[in-house]
Image (tube, grey):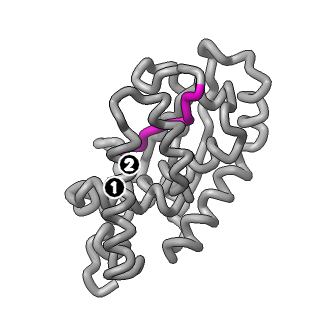
Amino acid sequence: MRATLQSYSGEFSSSKTLRRVYERFPGTVAGAERVIQARLGLAPLPDNVVISINLSDSPEYGCMPMCTPTGSAWTRADSPLHCDIELSSCAVANDYYGYTSTDKVLTHELVHVYFKVLGGQHYEQQPLWLKEGIALWTADQTYWRDFRKVALADRNDRWVRYKTYLDQFLEAKHRLGIEALVGQLIGRNNY
């Protein structure tokens, strides 16, 4: 897997914190990969998988005091081995919760990339609680205080949905085990 952090020239480009994020980037991606491989038992993605990571000033992410780093991940329709991850520039630049929050969001989004590459269309058909639950659990975004922070930043009560996704995932994990859930996401019933 090759990951690159694209240059950014938006509203927060002079942020010292943002510069440190760029400096730390190779280690951050390597750490996220190690977490995914250790917690989910997945092999590294092949070298032909390319991931472009962009910082966005999109109003979709918001930039309120207390906003948490948020992001999204998708594969390109014309090239399923080329993935994009977008992170909120505001939250990353302001570093409201320290580097660990940005690391966790990158890990969370990389979980989605792993499963999109490994499971393709099968992954997309899985229930949202399973996809988000496994990403939240893998990135260790399971502390309720984190959900309260998200609730302060997101007036759409996203924390309620994430808590529901995580609760459903944890219940299924307890019942079936992580191996069965990972197998479901990549389309292998005999995982």
Residue 84 can be seen in this image = yes
SS of the residue at dot 2? helix
Q: Position of residue 172 (x, y in %)?
A: 32, 73
Q: Which residue is mark 2?
A: 162
Number of residues whose C-alpha sits closer than 10 Å to that of mark 2, classed few (under 14), some (14–19) or many (20 or more): many
CA gap, disc 1 and disc 2: 5 Å
Q: Residue at the location (53% across, 20% down)?
A: 63
Residue furthest out toward the top: 11
Whether residue 128 sits left or right of residue 50 in the image: it is left
Does the residue at mark 1 contact the one at mark 2 (Cβ under 8 Å)? yes
Whether residue 56 sits left or right of residue 97 in the image: it is left
Report the label total.
Answer: 2
Residue 165 - label: 1
Residue nearer the viewer, 45 or 165: 165
Q: Position of residue 140 (x, y in %)?
A: 56, 59
Based on the picture, tell me whether residue 70 belongs to the magenta stretch. Answer: yes
Relative to 122, does residue 101 appear above or below in the rendering?
A: above
SS of the residue at dot 1? helix
> Which region shows up in magenta?
66-75
Number of residues whose C-alpha sits closer than 10 Å to that of mark 1, classed few (under 14), some (14–19) or many (20 or more): many
Q: Residue at the location (78% across, 34% down)?
A: 20
Residue nearer the viewer, 6 or 164: 164
Q: Amino acid at mark 1?
A: Tyr
Q: Position of residue 5 (x, y in %)?
A: 62, 37
- The image quadrant of residue 67 is top right
Residue 78 - label: none
Q: Position of residue 81 (x, y in %)?
A: 41, 52
- Quadrant (top left/top right/bottom left/bottom right) for the C terminus: bottom left
Q: Amino acid at mark 2?
A: Tyr
Based on the picture, tell me whether residue 175 belongs to the magenta stretch. Answer: no
Residue 117 can be seen in this image = no
Relative to 185, does residue 149 appear above or below in the rendering?
A: above
